[in-house]
Amino acid sequence: MKLMELFGVKSKKEKIAELMEQGAMVVDVRTPAEFKEGHIKGSINIPLDKIPAKADSLKLKGKPVITCCRSGMRSQSAAMTLKSKGIVTKNGGAWNSLRAML
């Protein structure tokens, strides 16, 4: 048994899977140009600088949010902003790594 399992801690992949089962939305916070170059099918593009203005509309959807970007830095910032607005959010990190988990 893995140590994480022993203490009831879920892996990132398990948390992502759980949120997806709850109907999570994947929000890619890269620029529109970056998003156009490649993204996760079904994800929506909301650049990081637009996240504060879009938080209320995301909250109204009543679904968890998984954020992603190129490396995980911008998605972490977006996740913190959304969490502060009461939205269940997980930083998915780099979009291509997250895509491999889905």
Image (cartoon, rainbow, N blue to C red):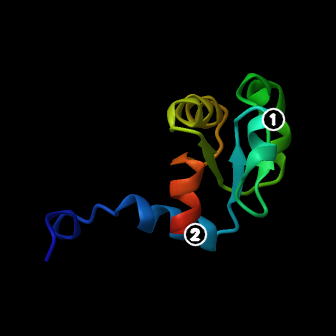
Q: How many marks?
A: 2
> Which amino acid does the dot numbered 2 rest on?
Leu
Q: Residue 25, percent across and down?
A: 72, 57
- Furthest toward the front, the residue is 37
State the residue at coordinates (64%, 69%): 22
Q: Nearer the viewer, residue 99 or 91?
A: 99
Q: Amino acid at mark 1?
A: Ala
Judged from the image, the secondary structure of the residue bearing numbered disc 2 is: loop
Compared across the picture, whether 27 is left or right of 61 comes to: left
Number of residues whose C-alpha sits closer than 10 Å to that of mark 1, classed few (under 14), some (14–19) or many (20 or more): few
- Quarter of the image where one finds residue 58: top right
Most foreground residue, 34 or 57? 34
Name the mark on residue 102.
2
**Would residue 82 appear left or right of 54 to someone viewing this image?**
left
Name which residue lies at 51% across and 31% down: 73
Specify whether 33 is left or right of 74.
right
**Residue 67: % across, % down:** 62, 45
Q: Circle 1 is placed at which residue position?
A: 33
Quadrant in which the N terminus is drawn: bottom left
Residue occupying the point 58% across, 69% down: 102
Confirm or deny contact between disc 2 and disc 1 (CB under 8 A). Answer: no
